[in-house]
Amino acid sequence: MRHRRAIATRWIHVGWPVGVVAFTAVYVGMPGLVGDSFFLVGSLLPIGAIAIGMRIYPVPYKLPWQLAAAAIALMSVPNLAWIIQVDIQGQQSPHPLAYLALACGHLTMLAASITIVVRHAPTDPGGVLHAALLGLGLSAPVWQAILRPTLLANGVPALRQAALLIMVLALMTLLGTLLRVMATTVRARPTFYYLLVGMSGGMAAVILTTLASGPERTTMTLLAEAVWFIGYFSCAAAVLHPSVVHLTAPEGDYPDDLSTRRLASTAVVLSMPASTAGATLAVGGTPDVLLLIVSTLISIPLMLIRFWQLALRRLRAEQALAHQASHDELTGLPNRRTLLEKVDEALRQLRSGSVKAVAVLFCDLDGFKPINDTLGHQAGDEVLRVVAQRLRGCAASSDVVGRFGGDEFLIVCRDDGGGSVDALVERIRRALAEPIQVREKTCTVGASIGVAVTTDGSASSDSLISEADQAMYALKQSTRATRSRK
């Protein structure tokens, strides 16, 4: 299997540049309808590669590639429109809606990347969103300083400008997230490298296509088409590489810190569209209002997601602290303080008439000290954890099982007088009589269980627990006396 994968990988690494050069050469050498048709075939090759990759490899999460196939189909609409409307019908250029399909294709590709990012975001939420904002912010100077002046000088229609702007914002955001996600994985690096080259090629092709309407239009156009081939073949290589199966599998956790450096860089990134507009005004130019609107509409949801992440992290931290304060660290059961609160709560229900009786079972383990002395405290801790699980299994869902301290456990239940407490005691004794396997040795513990039941609403939690404790102690003394007489 390893040998087959090595050969497949070698063919991918070799086939990628060979395919780019071959398709570019054919496209350049066969202008017109034949060359454009050949270009259309090249643009659709990644869809076939995706179908093959999904069939060959056990990819656990296929949605990103399904969206990528749809995106590539949309991005190929202008190529098809060029063949029909320019090569066949003799028009000057395709209908502007064809370029809108191109923009929709890039947005769909962005959605495909988001499905990948979402799988990695839980391990690096702050880093991924910061990278997305960075890519979005850097797109502002690229658009305002390089692309928009050329579009205005060449009289490009507003609809096509809007489509190109969406493409640039989507590609730059995608590049930022890919760079960050790639840093969180090792096994999927080859696939990420190809995706990164493909997205970078797409961004470069957009820029070159925009600049192709200048004096060096022919040379620039051919260069742009060659770069498009790099993007298409990189996408195909990414899905055909064996590492594609690890694409959506994050590795490790990364600290979600709010350092001064990250906050400062986020502020700079968010201000880039406005700063770019201000710089354009300062040199006598006209800022692109559409850039400000679209970038703001994208950045606001990203920031809201970030705020939600931080709020959720704080909520989880508070819940964890509350759980630690109210539960025993070893067994996960409610601790002494929580048990006292639960007894008080049950007594309040008794006084209000919502329950008929309150029962407290005080359980003290028999035979636990020898386990600690002979097998060590770690073995004793394991026994306590097993006992806690068995006690939870015996109690009803409405009962509260907690660790009172050491090898003492307390169960608080609301008894209806029908003998349910006696049945619970019997279940506990049977459950604890089962052997416990610790460090390849079999241990057995028992329990002395003292029971205190009250129907008097004036009783206190201390008196009820003390009564159960005394009953347990009396039972333990009686058991010892019985054994000594034997």
Image (cartoon, grey):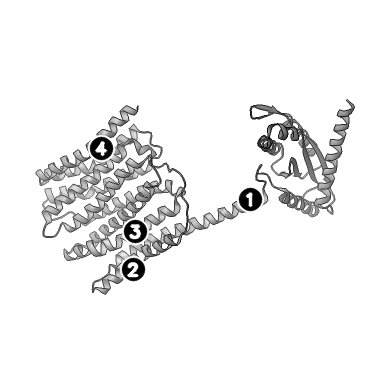
Q: CA distance from mark 3 to mark 1?
A: 40 Å
Q: Which residue is mark 2?
A: 274
**Residue 226 falls left or right of residue 165:** left
Question: Given this view, does label 4 or label 1 mark the residue nearer the observer?
Answer: 4
Residues at discs 1 and 2 in contact (Cβ within 8 Å):
no
- Mark drawn on residue 401: none
Q: Earlier in the sequence, mark 4 or mark 1?
A: 4
- Looking at the picture, does residue 256 appear above or below residue 283? above
Q: Amino acid at mark 4?
A: His
Q: CA distance from mark 2 to mark 3?
A: 13 Å
Could you say where residue 437 lies in the image, as x and y percent from the top left?
66, 29
Describe the element under mark 4 as helix, strand or loop: helix
Q: Earlier in the sequence, mark 4 or mark 2?
A: 4
- Mark drawn on residue 13: 4
Rendering quarter of residue 65: top left
Q: Earlier in the sequence, mark 3 or mark 4?
A: 4
